[in-house]
Amino acid sequence: MSTTETGTSRHGESRSASEHGATSDTGGHDDLIRPQDSVSQCRSKVSRTSTSVTGARVKAAARKVALEAEAAMLHQLQALEDEELKLHQRKRHLALQTKLAMAEAEEAVYALNDSNEHCDTFSVHASNNSEVQIATPPQSTPEVVDTSPACQTTKLEFDGMKEPDTKPEAETTVDPNKTSEPDKTVDPVKTAEPDSAHKNSETTVLELVQQGQKQQQRLLEVIQLPKAELLTYDGDPLQYWAFIRSFENSVDNSNLEDSAKLIRLLQYCTGKAKKVIQCCSVMQPLEGYKRAKALLKERFGNNYTIAEAWVNKLTEGSSISPHDKKALREYADDLKTCRETLNAMGYIQEVNTQTVLVTLIEKLPSYLRNRWIKQVRVIRKKNDRSPQIGDLVEFVEDAAEEANDPVYGALSKPKDRYVVTNKNVPKSSVSRYSKGSYTMMTNAKPGNMTCVLCNGSHTLFGCTEFKSKKPEDRFEFARATKLCYNCLRPGHMSNSCTLNRVCSVAGCGKKHTKFLHRIKTIPVGQFTPRTEVTTAPAEPAASVQSGFTDTEVDTSCNVTGVGVMGVALPIVPVKVKAKGSGVCIDTYALLDSGSTSTFCTEELAKRLKLCGQQQQLSLTTLAGANVQTATTVISLTVSGIDCKQPVELPLVYTRRELPIHDANLAKQEDIEKWPHLQGLKLPQVDKGRVQLLIGQDVPEALMPLEVKKGERNAPYATRTELGWSLNGPLGMANKHTATSNFIAADDSLERQLKMFWKLDTTDSIHDDTKGMSVKDKQAIAIWEESVRLTDGHYELAIPFKNYPPHLVDNRTVAERRLFSLGKRLQRDTLLHAKYTEGMQDLINNGYGESVPEEEVHPSNSTVWYLPHHLVYHPKKPDKVCIVFDCASKHVGTSLNDEVLSGPDLTNKLLGVLLRFRQETVALMADVQAMFHQVKVTHEERDVLRYLWWSDGDSSRQPSVYRMTVHPFGGTWSPSCCTFALQRTAEDNRADFQPDTVDTVMRNFYVDDCLKSVASEEKGIQLAQELRSLLARGGFRLTKWVSSNPQVLASIPIEERVKDVKELDLNYEALPTESALGMQWDVELDCFGYKISPSDKPLTRRGILSVCSSIYDPHGFVSPFTLRAKVIIQDLCRRKLGWDESLPSEHLNSWQQ
């Protein structure tokens, strides 16, 4: 039987005394008191005392719990003060929950105290951990069945704001200081189970309090976090995605206005990136913000740009020292990051080629290169495949972990072969030599470089702001900051500097850097009108081939005075390395269009550890002295500082020194003086001397890609594959050193003169055609095997030297060239429209086709992209010719290098002209777009790919196209197309007159047909048959003209030459047309000569130039030019120099 007593809590809630498994003695139910209760009454005094003490302690503990809860809430409220405006409603709700929790905590203490008054032992753990136990005799009333163990020893645990749980064991502990959650393993007292509704209410309140505490704690932690600094972006493609993600998370996803977002974007972009989006600040905020992000992605976030940047970062630079374990670890990290990035972008194929892998391996120390060779053998033998970038990444990571092992890493380092004992030499200037690798003395860049002027991550030598200062200002800055005048570093003076270098300015030689060399100016009043001219003796220079005689003119004039004009030579900073080596040296190169060969200093060859073939050459200067000199022939690879396209220098001759003065090297301050050169940046290198001279034997290095010109007498800038260079007068200078370098092969000039004399002899019309070489026969065999007629056109294979060709995907080169072309076209809208029309005509006429999306990245075929550019004649501005650059190189080769040029099937020009004058009636025609009429096999079209924007819109991503015909620009195309033209005649010989077939075989010079017949009837018949015959091969004869009006009238008007279409053939005279360079008067049927007099120097060279400018393959005007040629012969007998003035007797004869 159980007895229930109803009590009222502080909040008016009814609670049952049975919740605690005991009967209250204050309920007034006297009929339930038994006689056995007298035992307890004997001890009522002790009980009242204990109860009083216990009650006081319980109240104190409850009050403490309430205060602690209130303190916790106040702490949270204090943390929310900073967010008071946003969290006002939540704070009021939390305050109510706090008061409710305090009341519940006090109520729980009182209820537990009442329920346990009749237990055997009641223990309360107060804050001082003291325990008061009240012992009561066991209950003997049989009617009261109490199965709960709560009346044995009860210990209550107070969990801050939680309802106390009851342990089923001996006691329940009340610990008001404990703030952890209740023990989940303790089962509740079944007979003491509270009312379910009340329990759920208390649990809900406590859970809400807990959730509020956790949420407030998180808010507090967020508020206390340090402020996140946004990354800045300078245009580095490798950092594009890191910046964009940071900006999107911090700014783009916020509730800021578009104008504020645009301002933030401009604020966090610097350098090139800021320059690109600067134009967006004038747009509407929404449009400007979207356009700015699009421009950044287009310029720096393009997938191809990022892929190329990764490839360049990993493949450029010198090899890693065997002892530099930090560099090896960084290289391994870069490789892994590159692989993951390109793999995520879908451009892993950019580095997953054997050529690129070999370049990557070259950067490793020699001992790792040897290990890789063994690893490659294992991969091929085990997996039956070639190694891939993933294999290399794993290999380099393992090697980096071995080298950086804290215990055994030192065992993997190879021993030094050379030991430096000089303690004064810094470690950064000493190179470690390893077997099988080229090394050099270098100054390694410290990891924490900081410019003392602009705080940038570079040395003072690489600081643009420092270089832009005047020499006097640079000197004052070095003196004020107490820098060494030699190495520009603090801590020592120049006299104790260990850097073994002196000023490179000619005539100085002092121990300071050239950047601090100050030019002493002479006041105008002290000017002495005296000129000192010193002519330096000509120094021997190597010739193009062994046995040739070269002429070199080295003239140095030192003029002291005021008002002398400074002149810049086309000097560019370049990176030079030996072919196949990872050692790279920065220096300057002169692009000398007056030299027929390429030279470098012996010092440069020595630094590159190159030993070439020794040659003894005989050199002749204009002074007439023959000098025997020894030279070395080497091969180099050169690229611009900011241009990644390498240029091969197959034949380079060493010289002790190149007589090129630093005064002819343009500085950045020189550019800033001229408005048309604003924005042009010229990179600088620490080594200021010119150690390389590139001549006309490497045309791809000298070919101008872009020219910036100003007014008369202003310098102009030229961009080549090696970068920008400045040419021409720079302004006034106090000291001027004039240098003229002319290096030419006299043997070549003499051979030209010999051919010039041959034009007057019968030898010039002699057929000296040689028999076909083995390679020519190989090309013909390829065409004979592959030729077929498809859709009315002949289809011929590209005559590769080896199949498949050794070509590596060069899309990055084509994209760079296309981007450069796009900038040029944007400056000229009319030219852009014509170029776009020309590209569209290729597609419309079937000469090109779009590459399907699924074939853009083929897995089993060779891919090559052809850069293209425009060519137009200044006298024909309306005609734009699109030329595909088949000579563009990538990884040391080009498409032309991999293809056989084929035999020369073209008829001799003089023979065609003579047969043209043989009969009475002359006819002339032209094959329309001859090269585009011969198809390429479908399997080989992927090596003729090109990039272009859809509709000419350069703001879009370029699309991939490919040629379906043999392009104009391929070395094999002339021979291939002539083969197809003649094959058309041979295949249809049985259907046409022999004279028609013979005309195709003997009267064509490339695409020009010149023929003469005996009568008007034969001319009409021949014209009709020629058109029908060539149409069978897809060739269209157009631009017809004839000396006979009736023959011309038989030809459709649309097929006639432009100047004849509108003529009345019965009354109007026929015009003059060009016939293979000759001026053909069609009306009179005779050749004429149009000579434009020009001022030439009165020297042997000038007279030869005038005579050779007259195009006379027949020799018709020889009687008039004979006197001039006699003068040239006499000058040759006297061995007069090419540029020496004429003697008086010859001068009078020439002027007559």
Image (cartoon, helix red, strand yellow):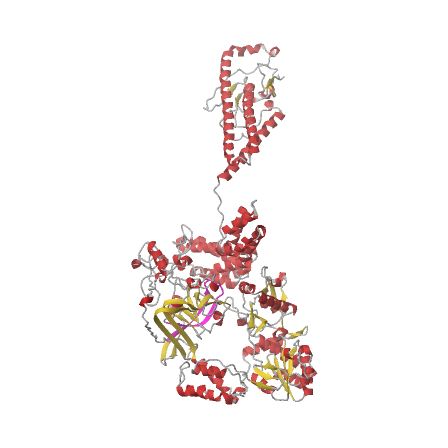
- x, y percent for residue 1101: 44, 81
Q: Residue furthest front?
A: 525
Q: Quadrant of residue 428?
A: bottom left
Q: Is residue 1148 above or below residue 846?
A: below
Instruction: Name the image quarter holding the N terminus.
Output: top right
Q: Report the predominant secondary structure element of the magenta stretch.
A: strand
Give the magenta-colored segment's residue range.
Answer: 630-655
- Tell me the residue at 58%/86% (across/down): 1087
- x, y percent for residue 170: 53, 23
Q: Nearer the viewer, residue 395 or 233?
A: 233
Q: Is residue 432 above or below residue 127?
A: below
Q: Is residue 376 left or right of residue 463?
A: right
Magenta run includes residue 637: yes
Q: Residue furthest left?
A: 495
- x, y percent for residue 901: 55, 75
Magenta run includes residue 757: no
Q: Nearer the viewer, residue 1019 or 847?
A: 1019
